[in-house]
Amino acid sequence: MQYVLSVIADHTELATAGEMAAIDTFNERLRAQGYWVYANGLAEPSTATVVDGRGEEPVFTDGPFLESKEFLVGFWIIEAPNLDVALKLAVEGSKACNRKLELRPALVLEE
Amino acid sequence: MTDAREALTRTHHGEWARVVAALTRRFGDLDIAEEAAAAAFAIAVERWPVDGVPPNPGAWLTTTATRKAIDRIRRENKRETKQGEAQMMIDHESPEPPGAIDDDRLRLIFTCCHPALAMETRVALTLRMVGGLTLREIARAFLVQDAAMGQRITRAKAKIKAARIPYRVPAAEDIPARLSGVLAVLYLVFNEGYLATGPDTKPVRHDLTAEAIRLTRLVRALMPEDGEVIGLLALMLLTEARRSTRVSARGELVALEEQDRGAWNADRIAEGHELVRDRLAAGVAPGRYQILAAISAVHTSACNMRDTDWSQIVALYDQLARLDPSPIVALNRAIAVGELEGPGVALAVVDRLEHRLAGYHPFHAARAELLRRLGRSQESSAAYDRAIQLAGNTAEIAYLTRRRDQLR
């Protein structure tokens, strides 16, 4: 089952060298133990564009969909058997990148 | 008739959690288990008075509930052609921690008290799934609308399923942290009963304290080796033993020094003392609940305030403060110091806690009491005012008001 770990921060500074090294070690462990699906950092919220393609003409809005003090700066997608395993990995991930995480299960699609 | 009703109550207490736990294990779904267990008990209410109580009521209920669950699953599968895959993770492999009895009810308890759920959700879910209280009873206990409580429980069940909170007893290395989460839920239920906070509730609610004790006894039966479970049970028993003397006929809180110690419940005290003695004899460093129980044991061993071994109590609070350096522990320690070394010494300590406890009514009540003993009536009266403003329990407000008015 997949879980998304969203990295939350109130600033857009890049990870320090120490944080980067810790993240690399954590990623290695995710890969080695079969939890890894994907991960990446995100450019700052001001670079976002909200797109609404439902109408006749697409509407583009400059900026993020929600202005907030804290925002998404990156994410992991992991594969874990249950929430207890995912929680432990999230604690490690949060330590590694030195930021808060939101852990959220992906929907399980019906067969 | 009466036999059937008694059997129903007894069976509900003894078997509810077992039925829900067994069905959750079998069907991997708390919602199905809860609904089927409730349906089985509803059938028992109708049938037992007419047909007689079955020879093995627990087995009868499990069989009936299992049939109900299978009916529901068939019905839903017919309606939706595809079966949802999302099911609770049943972990048959995980080894049980040492000292735990292999019982589905333990899985149920740990699942309901999972740290990924909000505290109030854990409390509600535990009372419903393990305690078997109805939605309405839980809603009334926590002064929320039935619909709101129903939603809280429904949301919790959905999260457990969608986020795949596993149905299992945690691994041995995680037990201390996870168990302390379970005990916190039980202690919160007990305290809400013992010092109800609502303006419209009775000051002491025996239904909640009794339920908390019953559930703690269950956890103890399932984890008989754990010292903190025993400590919490002893603490609850020794506190509950004083319940009938704690509120006067006029609905006013009675301070410890004015309580009729002869009316304390001797059986509960004896049981609590025995548990505390067993823990002392075990020679293992005690946790928070064991220390609190030991403090309660010192109080309940004395025939009055003066006879109380206050130096022992201060020593126990010292031990507690090392585990839990919170200002609340420091406040309680200071109150005991006041009995030993006088109100002046205690007040100096209490005053240093002000910046951290300014919003905590027992802080102001303790200050008011110390100031009163020092003859500083005006300051005492002001401290009582502040305590009254912040207190939520009706009996306590009545007590504080009388104490304040006596100063005038």
Image: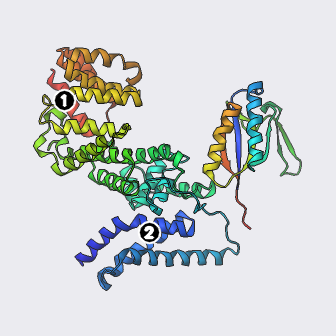
Relative image position of residue A2 (x, y in whole percent): 72, 53
Eyeballing the image, is A81 above or below B59?
above
Q: Which residue is mark 2?
A: B19
- Residue A44 occupies quadrant: top right
Identify the coloring.
rainbow
Q: Looking at this view, is B59 or B173 the one in front?
A: B173
Residue type highlighted by circle 1: Asp
Residue type highlighted by circle 2: Val
Q: Which residue is mark 1?
A: B309
Distance of mark 2 from mark 1, alpha carbons? 47 Å
Local packing at callout 2 (Cα closer than 10 Å; few below 14, some 14-19, many 20+) is many
Residue B33 in the figure: left or right of residue B280: right
Residue A13 in the figure: left or right of residue B148: right
How many numbered marks appear? 2
Relative image position of residue B74 (x, y in whole percent): 60, 78
Asked whether the viewer can see residue B351, the reply is: yes
Local packing at callout 1 (Cα closer than 10 Å; few below 14, some 14-19, many 20+) is some
- Quadrant position of the C terminus of chain B in the picture: top left
Q: Mark 2 or mark 1: which comes first in sequence?
A: 2
Q: Residue furthest bottom?
A: B51
